[in-house]
Amino acid sequence: MSREVSHKRLVSLDAFRGFTIAAMILVNTPGSWDHVYAPLLHAEWHGVTPTDYIFPFFIFIVGISVTLSFGKLLARGKSKASLGWKTLKRAAIIFALGLFLWLFPDFNFSEIRFPGVLQRIALVFLACALLYLHTTWRQQALVGVVLLVLYWAMMELVPVPGVGAGVLEPGLNLAAWVDSVLVPGKMWQGTWDPEGILSTLPAVVTGILGMLAGRILAAVNLSEEKRVLWLFLGGFVLFAVGTVWGWVFPLNKNLWTSSYVLYTGGLAALTMASAYFVIEILGYAKWAAVGVVFGSNAISAYVLGSILPGLLAPANRWYVSMFIDGAALPKLASMLWAIGVCILCYIPIYILYKKRIFIKI
């Protein structure tokens, strides 16, 4: 695969990123958690729902963005050292934002939770950026394979004190034990955390898959049609291998299992290929305008979507009592609240977009 990269900005990537963020806000802000359509909830443990695609899709996009943006910066003469320091700074800011969102609005530091969504994004971004700067794409692929196999072997073969080996149940698996020993503060589920330390290793591989997809999208020696073909082919292979691996190492978002990495990475590649074909090749971009706006300031949109529920708590209680409790279609009313939150997030992001203001973290 060529090291040369295309410097063309991809509207399809912006749209993919934006729709992913919008979906993340939608599933995180129902009017009432007691009334939610099943596809808008995470799987309770093993298995996946459409909601379980959202987080790995975003991390996959982070990987693509690392390849495209760092490739451009290196081509413009930026040094690897300067990009390395910039990476550390950005990762630290994203991690700190995650801590802020957990503490908001009460700022009870005695209940602080160090793992989290933005924290995992920060760590994956840092790992992928450093890999991009100091390894070839073949070495990145090898690192990905090693991490997935190593994680599978550790989860299945390393005995958990007092439990034994191969137990994947909540709070009893190796990832939960590692977190109980190493993670300070509060964990999401008391005895375990879905964004814990050990499960971040396979999450890095999700980012690596995005980096490899970015190599395909940026390769100047490939026609647009061949880029789509390679993405479709690679996505299908990943999806198939992840499905088969899931028969023995179950698909599990909370554990971020190796099979889940390949399964969702394959779906992400197929989605990116479809968006690229429709928008970049066929030229149908108007339908994706909402996604492009959200994608232009994705982290800002996510922060807004995380802050608004706290600010709107009194209004939410009124809405629940008036339109959800005792309603004929409570799940629909609950989803309409989430759509309303998405619209509220969209308005300031749209204003920023029209003014060409892009908040760089």
Image (cartoon, grey):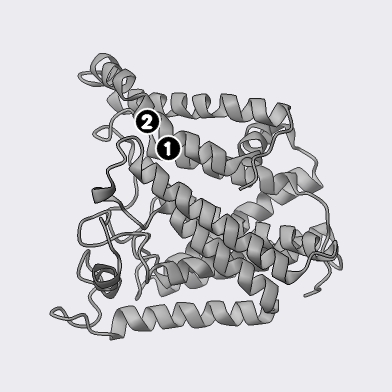
Residue contact at pointers 2 and 1, CB within 8 angstroms: yes
Viewer-proximal residue among 305 and 181: 181
Q: Residue under label 1, please give it.
A: 306
Identify which amino acid the numbered label 1 is placed on: Ser
Q: In this view, does 302 lie above or below 6?
A: above
Residue 85 point in image, percent of width and height = 64, 64
Q: Which mark is residue 309?
A: 2
Look at 60% across and 46% down and name the residue there. 17
Give whichever of 119, 79 is nearer the camera.
Answer: 79
In the rendered structure, find residue 262 and report the number of the disc placed on it: none
Height in image: 250 above or below 304? below
Q: Quadrant of the N terminus?
A: bottom right
For residue 67, what is the image quadrant?
A: bottom right
Cα–Cα gap, marks 2 and 1: 7 Å
User: Where does the image place residue 84, in percent across and percent down from the top left?
Assistant: 66, 67
Is residue 176 among the parts visible in the rendering?
Answer: yes
